Amino acid sequence: MTADLHLHSTYSDGSYTPEELVKKSLKKGFKTIAIADHDTVEGIPLAEKVAESLAIEVIPAIEFSTFRGKAEIHILGYFIDYTNQELLTETKKIFSARENRAKKMVELLNKQGIDISFEQVKSLAGDDYLGRPHIAKAMIEKGYINEIGEAFTKDYIANGGKAYVPKYKLTPKKAIDLILNAGGIPVLAHPKFINHGEAMDYNDIKEMKNYGLQGIEVYQSKHDKKDEKKYKKIAKELDLLITGGSDFHGENAPDVKLGDVRLSEKEVKKLKEAEN
C-alpha cells in the first residue's frame, strides 16, 4: 500500500469532490492521501468524514502559492490544524483576492471579444472556489474553445497571457510561518516546476530551509527520474524530508492520472514521525 500526498479537489482547481477523491484513491490501492487544495482547507473535513468508515487515511494539507519576485513557488503544508485562526484569516484574504482576480480576467477576455460573464463562471464553479479552469469551461460553453487546455495559452489565461491576472502575493517565508504556526510540516512542491522562474537548486532550497522548510516533494508528475535523483540528493544533503504526490486535478489536467506517483510507506512514516 502506498500514498499520494498531492491531490486537488473541487475546492480548488480539481474536478472531483473530496469524497470522490477518497473513494477513487482507495480503489487505486492507496492507504494514505493528502488533499492539498490551493490556498484553502475547506475540503479537508469532508474528506476526513468519508474516510472514517474506509480503510484509508487523510492527512490534512494545503498548498500555498507564494512569490519571490516573479517566480511562483508552491509550499505544501502537512498535518496542519485547519481550524487555526491565523491560517483561516489568510485563506479568507486569498479567497477575496481570487474572486477579484477572476472578475478581472473575465473583463480582459471580454475586451478580446470573448463574450463570457463572471456570473457564468461562478455558476460553473458550483462552490466557493473560483479558478482559471472555470473560466476555461465558460469559454467552452460559449463555443470559443473545445477543451480546457486551449484557454491556457498566451492569447488567453496562461501564466503571462493576455488575459492573465497575477495572484495575491504571499511570500514563501510567510507561508512557511503560517504552516508552522498551525502545527504543520512545510514542504517545497515540485521544485523543478516554478512558474515564471528557474528550477530550484541547492542554494534556493537551503534558503527555504532557513525559513523553516522541512521537506521536498521529490516524487512528482512534473519530475522525471533525473529530477528525482537531483532533489533526493539535495534533500539528504540538507536533512529534509522526502515526500511525493501526483498533483492530480482530475479532468482539469487529464495528462496526470491518479496512481502516477506513489510514495512509499517508509517516507510516509518519516513524515508522521516529524509531525509528532
Image (tube, rainbow, N blue to C red):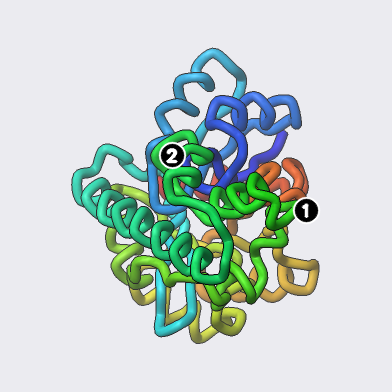
Mark 1 residue element: loop
Percent position of residue 215, x then y:
50, 62
> Nearest the camera: 131 or 236?
131
Percent position of residue 76, x then y:
47, 56
Is 126 positioned to the left or the right of 177 in the image? Answer: right
Is 230 positioned to the left or the right of 85 in the image? Answer: right
Percent position of residue 270, x then y:
54, 49
Q: Amino acid at mark 2?
A: Pro
Tell which circle, 1 or 2, labels the residue nearer the N-terminal end: 2
Answer yes or no: is residue 237 visible. Answer: no
Please rate how many residues cluster around mark 1, counting C-alpha atoms within 10 Å: few if below 14, some from 14 to 19, many from 20: few
Q: Amino acid at mark 1?
A: Asp
Answer yes or no: is residue 230 visible. Answer: yes
In the displayed structure, would residue 264 be above or below residue 107? above
Q: Quadrant of the C terminus?
A: top left
Name the residue that disc number 1 marks: 255
Determine the residue located farthest toward the top in the rendered image.
53
| Residue at the spot 64% in from the left edge and 76% down from the top edge | 154
| Residue at the spot 49% in from the left edge and 18% down from the top edge | 52
Mark 2 residue element: strand
How many numbered dots are placed on residues in this image? 2
In the displayed structure, would residue 66 be above or below residue 117? below
Percent position of residue 228, x then y:
72, 67
Name the residue that disc number 2 marks: 60
Q: Quadrant of the N terminus?
A: top right
Is 258 positioned to the left or the right of 179 in the image? Answer: right
| Residue at the spot 32% in from the left edge and 40% down from the top edge | 82
